Image: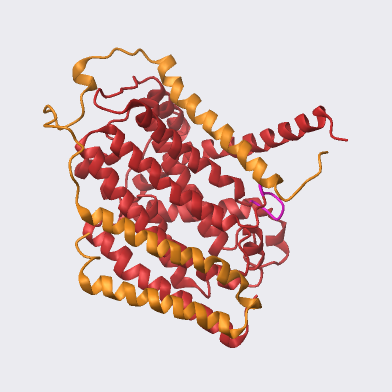
Chain colours: A red, B orange
Amino acid sequence: METFFDNLLYILDILLRIITIILPLLIAVAYLTLLERKVMAAMQQRRGPNVVGVYGLLQPLADGLKLLLKETILPTSANTILFLLAPVLTFMLSLISWAVIPLGEDMVFADLNVGVLYLFAVSSLGVYGIIISGWASNSKYAFLGALRSAAQMVSYEVSMGLIIITVLLCAGSLNLIEIVNAQKSIWYVVPLFPCFLMFFISILAETNRAPFDLPEAEAELVAGYNVEYSAMGFALFFLGEYANMILMSSMAVILFLGGWLPIFAIAPLDWIPGVIWFGAKITLVLFGFVWVRAAFPRYRYDQLMRLGWKVFLPLSLAWVILVAGILVGMDWLP
Amino acid sequence: MPHISLLDSYFSILIFLVVSLGLSLVILGLSYLLASQKSDTEKLSAYECGFDPFDDARSTFDVRFYLVAILFIIFDLEVSFLFPWCVTLGQLPLFGFWSMMVFLLILTVGFVYEWQKGALDWE
């Protein structure tokens, strides 16, 4: 007999789980900004933020507070509703993708059998937030920046999709937990190493990170699609971008680096809980993100698009056909 | 405990969606409450390096962006057809593999044509 009370408890349970995902995620995003600044600084032989707290640990709080206390500017020529909708949409999408990410064998908010498809769909929707913000800002810089950013995201999504197909051929299921479990014998980064490299570069381009950050580089397009945003609108875009970075890193970890699995399933490594492994691997990938930003010069826009369409698309398509052919020919299909 | 059906995980995602929407709106509204809002014409005009904006920003834009969008649709549809195929390939006969290869071949011919025509250039 389902009483009202039972249903209420069920919904409260869901809400509690949601908070357990969102709260650590927001803290992680905040400290990712600090990590980036500190690591880039270290790579450039300087210190990074170290004034605000011990080792600069309260810097993200200071940044957040600063953004909170700024005035929200609504440009007169902007479409107010769309202008305010865009950052809300971007931030919302970067949050809801986390619903299907498994942190352990049975630690997932929603165990969808089509988890990968859900992630792919949500990242495709992310382009809307950018286009809406560029259009609604009614400013040439914003509009051009948004168009270029959207075109870039969309170009690299194709190769991302094809690389995901390659991994799915080996794993045999769209369920993220199954994909990780299929890597118990060997992580996919070993046999599919070139795919991992292409995936890593594609997610750099997808999240508009250096060296593919021309649409939002300060010197080039004056921050691109978010030039007209201030205070919390900007904060939402910023949070959304970093949350997206962490999400894409976790996708790379689940698809290639074995999710929560230890390197070898032997005694001392086995005692470390899966969540710690997962977090460590994500941190590794994020370190790679920051490292690439510190090390490489920016790609020019036409070089970036050439890379996406003329190099990655044919290569990832070739990999799909190669892996499919080998698996069918040797009868190694899952 | 209410009975769990296959759709329950989707219901949880709906709740998640509502909560994250609420959170975004709260964050957006916070600065309205906490900061002083003093508007002035200069602050509210669009940014154009210190000058008055020349005219409405919504003028024509390069057709290459449209072309990229169309190409994306084609290849994204190709990827969506690949999704069910790749997870069921183990249960399909060899004919299933080859029919997908024919599909990919047709799309590849289209891709080569685009490339030769210069649709993928300069951008």
Give percent across and percent down for residue A238: 39, 37
Please state, as top left, top right, bottom left or bottom right, where the N terminus of chain A lies in the image: top right
Range of residues picked out in magenta: A103-110
Give percent across and percent down for residue A123: 46, 50
Rendered image quadrant of residue A53? top left
- Position of residue B2 relative to residue A294, above or below, is above
Front residue (pair B105, A122) = B105
Please state, as top left, top right, bottom left or bottom right, where the C terminus of chain A lies in the image: bottom right
Front residue (pair B26, A267) = B26
Question: Which residue: 31% across, 23% down?
Answer: A74
Asked whether residue A107 is drawn in magenta, I would say: yes
Front residue (pair A13, B108) = B108
Rendered image quadrant of residue A82? top left
Looking at the image, can residue A300 be seen? Answer: no
Question: Which residue: 30% across, 33% down?
Answer: A136
- Position of residue B30 relative to residue A285, above or below, is above
Residue closest to the far right: A1
Front residue (pair B60, A280) = B60
Rendered image quadrant of residue A115? bottom right
Q: Is residue A282 left or right of residue A63?
A: right
Residue closest to the far bottom: A329
Give percent across and percent down for residue A257: 55, 63
- Position of residue A96 relative to residue A248, above or below, is above
- Position of residue B83 relative to residue A298, above or below, is below
Looking at the image, can residue A241 be seen? Answer: yes
Q: Is residue B105 left or right of residue B48?
A: right
Number of residue marks:
0
